[in-house]
Image (tube, rainbow, N blue to C red):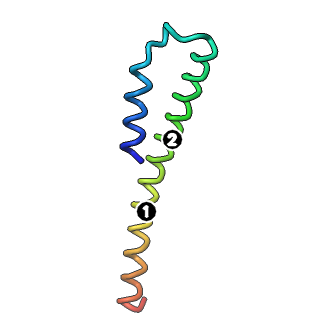
């Protein structure tokens, strides 16, 4: 997903905003806001994966140690 986000960012920033109509500028702004939200969700997802790995290792340790 990160590659897709990076490619989309690159594409959005190559658009000449001054040549867009008002409706196109609004659509571009909406696209950029949606992209920012997707980037944030990806960051949250990465942190959740790390937390899951820690919890999983603790569960394995408890199973092995019997505590």
Quadrant of residue 66 within the rendered picture = bottom left
Q: Mark 1 packing: few (<14 Cα in 10 Å), some, or many (20+)?
A: few
Residue at image point 37% right, 36% down = 6
Residue at image point 44% right, 47% down = 43
Compared across the picture, whether 60 is left or right of 27 comes to: left
Quadrant of residue 22 within the rendered picture = top right
Q: Which numbered marker is on residue 40?
A: none
Compared across the picture, whether 65 is left or right of 27 comes to: left
Residue 42 on image: x %, y %: 46, 47
| Residue wearing tag 2 | 38
Residue at image point 47% right, 53% down = 45
Residue 4 on image: x %, y %: 41, 42
Residue 53 on image: x %, y %: 39, 67
Q: Is residue 32 above or below residue 55?
A: above
Compared across the picture, whether 2 is left or right of 34 comes to: left
Q: Quadrant of the C terminus?
A: bottom left
Compared across the picture, whether 60 is left or right of 18 comes to: left
| Residue wearing tag 1 | 51
Element assignment for label 1: helix
- Alpha carbons under labels 2 and 1: distance apart: 20 Å
Element assignment for label 2: helix
């Amino acid at each position: 997903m990160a590659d897709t986000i990076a490619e989309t960012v690159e594409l959005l920033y190559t658009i000449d905003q001054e040549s867009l109509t008002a409706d196109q500028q609004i659509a571009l702004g909406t696209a950029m806001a949606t992209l920012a939200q997707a980037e944030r969700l990806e960051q949250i997802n990465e942190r959740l994966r790390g937390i899951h790995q820690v919890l999983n290792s603790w569960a394995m340790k408890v199973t092995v140690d019997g505590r």
